[in-house]
Image: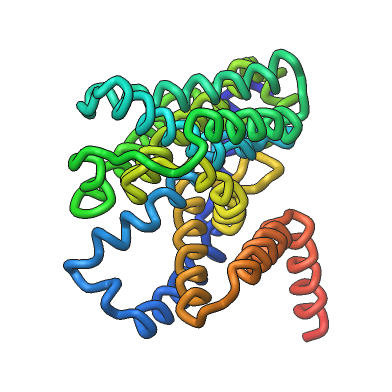
């Protein structure tokens, strides 16, 4: 099978069906949230709401490329990496060095994310560690480094950064989506989807599978840099322990949005919808003063149910049941 025929097969199998579940939840949860808290969706509060959900959206977008690369691809170090970048930016760059210009802060944050992605990709591709093992190691390293650099929350951010979570909250998300749109226009994107769908077939078709996987993890780290900036803008300070909580919710959001943990299926649109769904659900549970422990249970249930509903085996079972029903008629 040639490269063109393989990629054509990948294209033909990609439909909007991946995001139907997340889109359905989005409509329902949007209506419920608008009823319970209409002020949040008022024109003067809309940007602030986007600022609240931006770190989660960008975290879900960040985990997507690694998952799409297949072979159990995943990056569970996303949350601690966000916290570590946040701490380095606020404590080292802004406070110790006194460099407050976005021309310095933004490249540092994105560069740190990119380096982390390359490290994780190296461990997975070159050292051949299982992705969950490799990123668990970096999860622990980043968590420890963040606390070592800044043992307790503190510091502050310049006005331009805090405004990213208020009137300019769309900038970071828009920049990340623009980057993904550019990625989709180059051969790497189709090669990534082909690698995630069937890496052996992709390899025999001429795709440099190892390079593609390394690039996927690099993208994941780069997007984590965007997420870290959104996190810093939201909390307007540094907190070494705030990041890890984003790992589970980001993966759950991506899975809910139709990003298959088997690889090769899904995209950032679905991951974004899934992340917004989780934000809306969290808002509803918080409105009713549900325990934080119950929130974790809810996120775990969402992850399991999303994986079940988006599983190929579930799809086969549904089609089989439909066939039985039609035969019965």
Q: Nearer the viewer, residue 182 or 194?
A: 182
Residue 161 image-quadrant placement? top left
Left or right, 327 with respect to 204, comes to right
Q: Is residue 277 visible in the rendered structure shown here?
A: yes
Q: Could you tell whether 222 is left or right of 172 in the image? A: right
In the image, is 99 to the left or to the right of 111? left
Q: Is residue 62 above or below residue 37?
A: above
Residue 1 image point, x, y percent: 69, 24
Q: Count of labels shown?
A: 0
The answer to whether residue 196 is visible is no
The answer to which quarter of the image holds residue 176 is: top left
x and y, in percent, of residue 230 in the image: 36, 44
Q: Position of residue 162 (x, y in %)?
A: 25, 46
Q: Is residue 180 above or below residue 25?
A: above
Residue at coordinates 74% horizontally, 54% vertically from top-left? 312
Is 10 left, or right, of 203 in this rendering?
left
Front residue (pair 234, 213)? 234
Report the residue at 56% width, 28% height from top.
145
- Residue at left offset 75%, top offset 68%: 318
Q: Nearer the viewer, residue 95 or 219?
A: 95
Is the image coloured rainbow, by chain, by secondary structure, or in one colour? rainbow
The residue shown at (76%, 62%) is: 314
Quarter in which the C terminus is drawn: bottom right
Q: From the top left corner, tell me how far across and down residue 125 is, in percent.
A: 69, 18
């Amino acid at each position: 099978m040639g490269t063109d025929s393989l990629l054509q097969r990948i294209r033909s199998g990609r439909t909007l069906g991946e995001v139907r579940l997340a889109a359905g939840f989005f409509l329902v949860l949007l209506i419920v949230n608008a009823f319970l808290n209409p002020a949040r969706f008022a024109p003067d509060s809309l940007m602030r709401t986007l600022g609240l959900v931006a770190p989660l959206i960008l975290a879900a977008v960040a985990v997507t490329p690694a998952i799409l690369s297949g072979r159990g691809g995943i990056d569970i170090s996303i949350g601690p990496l966000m916290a570590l970048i946040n701490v380095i930016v606020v404590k080292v760059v802004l406070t110790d060095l006194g460099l407050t210009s976005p021309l310095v802060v933004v490249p540092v944050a994105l560069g740190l994310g990119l380096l982390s992605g390359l490290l994780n990709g190296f461990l997975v591709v070159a050292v051949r560690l299982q992705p969950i093992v490799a990123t668990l190691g970096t999860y622990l390293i980043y968590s420890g480094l963040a606390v070592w650099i800044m043992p307790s929350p503190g510091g502050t951010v310049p006005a331009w950064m805090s405004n990213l979570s208020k009137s300019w909250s769309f900038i970071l998300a828009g920049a990340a989506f623009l980057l993904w749109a550019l990625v989709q226009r180059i051969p790497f994107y189709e090669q990534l989807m082909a690698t995630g769908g069937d890496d052996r077939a992709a390899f025999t078709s001429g795709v440099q599978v190892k390079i593609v996987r390394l690039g996927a993890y690099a993208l994941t780290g780069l997007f984590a840099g965007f997420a870290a900036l959104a996190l810093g803008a939201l909390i307007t300070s540094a907190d070494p322990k705030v990041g890890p909580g984003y790992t589970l919710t980001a993966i759950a959001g991506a899975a809910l949005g139709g990003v298959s943990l088997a690889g090769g299926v899904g995209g950032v649109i679905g991951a974004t919808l899934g992340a917004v769904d989780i934000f809306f659900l969290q808002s509803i549970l918080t409105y009713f003063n549900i325990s934080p422990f119950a929130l974790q249970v809810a996120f775990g249930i969402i992850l399991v149910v999303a994986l079940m509903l988006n599983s190929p085996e579930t799809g086969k079972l549904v089609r089989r049941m439909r066939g039985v029903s039609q035969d019965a008629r």
